[in-house]
Image (cartoon, rainbow, N blue to C red):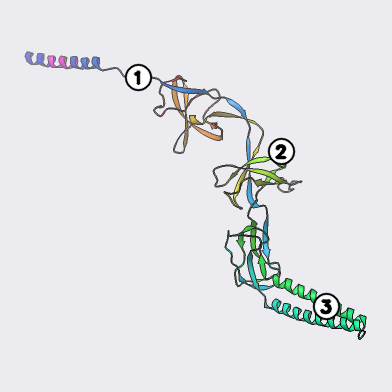
Amino acid sequence: MRSSALSIFAVITATAWIGCSREQIKPAAVQPAAMQVRIALVQRELVPTVIEIPGIIRPAERATIAAHITGTIDLLPLTLGQTVKHGDLLAHLNAPELAARLARARALLARAEREEARDRDLASSGADTEDTARAAEETLLAARAAATEAEAMLAYTEIRAPYDGRIAQKLTYPGDLATPGSPLLQLERASGLQVESAVPASLAPAIKIGADFVLQISGVATPTIGRVSELAAAADANTHTVLVKLDLVTSDTTWSGRAVRVQLQGEPAEALLVPTSAVTRFGQMERVFVEVGGKAQLRLVKTGATRGDHIELLAGIASGESIVVAPPTPLRDGQRIVAGP
């Protein structure tokens, strides 16, 4: 029994010694080296503000093509968006009564010419009076006027383009009855688009004829320039806005009806600006690394407008803090950092 107890004690002592030996030879954790990064101080700056006013693109000239006479549309050879030249046929109306009126007017004109020639010869030979010759001449003038009117009325059956442009709307189709004043088509001039915008009356004094403004067209990535061509002399009493029209300097990439944001300069305001490269994105999250006690602290932020190579931070950062510019990909939250070039 004494021998067994000694054996057990020896095993326990050996196990404890081996455990202590393992504790002593366990290597110490290796701290990663500090990463060298660029650090920038965040401070409030006075920057110009931009106020965006909605607008709409409209053609500088737009004509509603209407009928002058009553007739059935028998030809409408155009499609939406099709370009036309000045004088091109837009529509043809079938009005047989006008052709009949012209034929009758021409027949009366021919008879009046014969009678006027006969009465003039008789008056010159003394066989008839001068009054009869003058009456025949007046009848001839009236017949000519009636023929000219009938020709003009018949010409209304052919409706032609008043200028170069493109078809913006088709309001009727072949077989429809056209009446005087009823719109058939809408034609926009091929060149010359404008932006119409209702500007708050408080901002209108800063707008001058000929001034250029930046325009952001819906669906177009690159901003364009609009030049003020018209400015209302008075504000609308209900909306307290002033109508402004701006000519598009380039209009090759757009068309009428598109939405536009007109960028106007407001009063300068303070903003926190940081280099755009300091902000990284992960899905819908915007993040920056902030230097806190010699370590990188990952922080979520909310960004605002981009100004050149800087971006405005609206939340998540306070003035006086330092951020990492263009953080390296291996940088992690809590990692030690040192300022570098």
User: Residue at image x 54%, y 26%?
Assistant: 318
The relative height of residue 177 versus residue 264 in the rendered view (above or below) is below
- What amino acid type should be assigned to the residue bearing mark 3? Leu
Whether residues under marks 1 and 3 lie with C-beta atoms below 8 angstroms apart, the answer is no
Front tag of 2 and 3: 3
Q: Position of residue 163 (x, y in %)?
A: 67, 59
Front tag of 1 and 3: 3
- What amino acid type should be assigned to the residue bearing mark 1? Gln
Alpha-carbon span between mark 1 and mark 2: 61 Å
**Which residue is label 3 attached to?**
140
Q: Position of residue 65 (x, y in %)?
A: 67, 63
Quarter of the view holding residue 100: bottom right
Indicate left or right for 72 with 141 as reference. Answer: left
Tag of residue 31: 1
Indicate left or right for 56 with 33 as reference. Answer: right
Tag 3 or tag 1, which sits nearer the N-term? 1
Foreground residue, 29 or 115? 115
Foreground residue, 299 or 9? 299
Indicate left or right for 225 with 38 as reference. Answer: right
**Which residue is label 2 attached to?**
206
15 magenta-colored = yes
SS at badge 1: loop
User: Number of labelled discs?
Assistant: 3
